[in-house]
Amino acid sequence: MHEEKIALVDGQVKAVQQAVAARAVENVYFVACGGSLATLYPGKYILERETAAVSTGAYTAAEFLNDPPARLGEKSLVVLNSQSGGTPETAAAARLATGRGALTAAFTTTPGSALEQAADHIVYYFDDPASPYPAVLTIFPEVYKLTYALLDVWNGTGRLPEVNAAMLRLQDTFDEACAAYRPAARAFGAKYAGEPILYSIAAGLDACVGYVLTNCLVMESLWKHSSPLHAGEFFHGAFEAVDDTAAVFALLGLGKTRALEERAVKFLQRKTGKLTVLDAAALDLEAYPGWLRAPVSALVLNRLAALYCDEMSYAMGHPISSRRYMGVEKY
């Protein structure tokens, strides 16, 4: 079954690639809400740095809907994401984009959803806890696949097969990393279960991991105060709030912005004893081509950050699925 699902996704990505190749796209807009927008961020980040063929933008769906960019039109590709496919703002944003003549492609887990009905192309990812599925079928790897498929069109490269093969290896990498880090994650959970606030700090591609950690896991799932800090902005205001009571979760990736993250970590090591660091340099990524290790390292850091929050939820006796408002109240 997994082979069939993987083939389905690869075919859907290929269909978007072919549609893009058949028209003159000049700008790409990534549109979603919350964690769904954060998981699209690698698309924007990688495209901005690896091609001059298009410009990019990222918008929360409500803002895109109410105040769309002036260049939205027939030369636009709009990439959307909604796990349920029913996020009203995202579905409405897709309808707006389609109405303006843009090509639209949407990620979702739900066939027949409002978002699927509004978009030109759909790419499914899978979210069924009752039926475990490999990492290749989760949202971040699928965004990577689409991103490099687009780069193959605009840059004339042929990297998609190599990316597809790399994403198939992710589950083994995740399993090995989680096994190695589980004792540290369990100690973290026990130590910080009662902590009222937890910051994250990262830069570059890792910044979306910090956002998912703070907004989707610590705040949404664990009901703790949190804020994602950008390592490059940290020394321009936010660091004044840091003292020895501040709990900070820092990410060190393998990309060109690692120096920004290292500078922040060195400062924090001197100012707080409540610093947790996940360093991608300690990961075994030898199975991946050199050019892809930095992007892959962000995915592994994301998986480990989720492991640390899982262990905190166990220590708190607070299920990660707990919600007070989302899906409970009208808002």
Image (cartoon, rainbow, N blue to C red):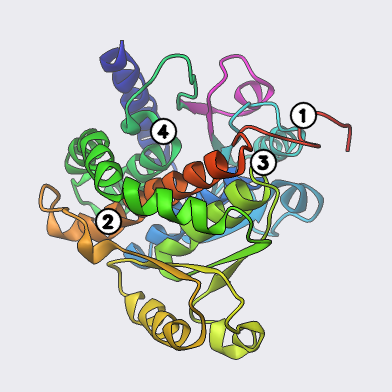
Name the residue beneath numbered marker 4. 138
Residue 155 circle label: 2
**Number of marks present in the image shown:** 4
Q: Quadrant of the N terminus?
A: top left
Q: Amino acid at mark 1?
A: Gly
Verify CB contact (< 8 Å) between mark 4 and mark 2: no
Mark closest to the chain's N terminus, 3 or 2: 3
Q: Identify the residue position indicated by label 1 in the image.
A: 327
On the rendered structure, is 300 left or right of 202?
left
How many neighbours does mark 3 have within 10 angstroms: few (below 14), some (14-19), or many (20 or more)?
many
Under tag 3, what secondary structure? helix
109 and 237: which is toward the camera: 237
Is residue 180 visible to us here?
A: yes
Helix, strand or loop at disc 4? loop
Residue 80 vs 291, above or below: the answer is: above
The residue drawn where x is 45% and y is 56% is 188
The region drawn magenta spans 106-123
Which is closer to the viewer, label 1 or label 2? 1
Looking at numbered disc 2 in the image, what kind of residue is underneath it? Asn
Marks 4 and 1, how far apart at CA: 22 Å
Give the foreground label among 4 and 3.
4
Judged from the image, the secondary structure of the residue bearing numbered disc 2 is helix
Q: CA distance from mark 3 to mark 2?
A: 25 Å
Identify the amino acid type marked 4.
Thr
Sequence order check: which comes first, mark 4 or mark 1?
4
Q: Earlier in the sequence, mark 4 or mark 2?
A: 4
Q: Is residue 117 above or below residue 44?
A: above
Q: Earlier in the sequence, mark 1 or mark 3?
A: 3
In three-dimensional space, the C-alpha distance between marks 4 and 2, rounded to whole angstroms, equals 26 Å
Residue situated in front as seen by the camera: 324 or 56: 324
- Residue 81 counted in the magenta span: no
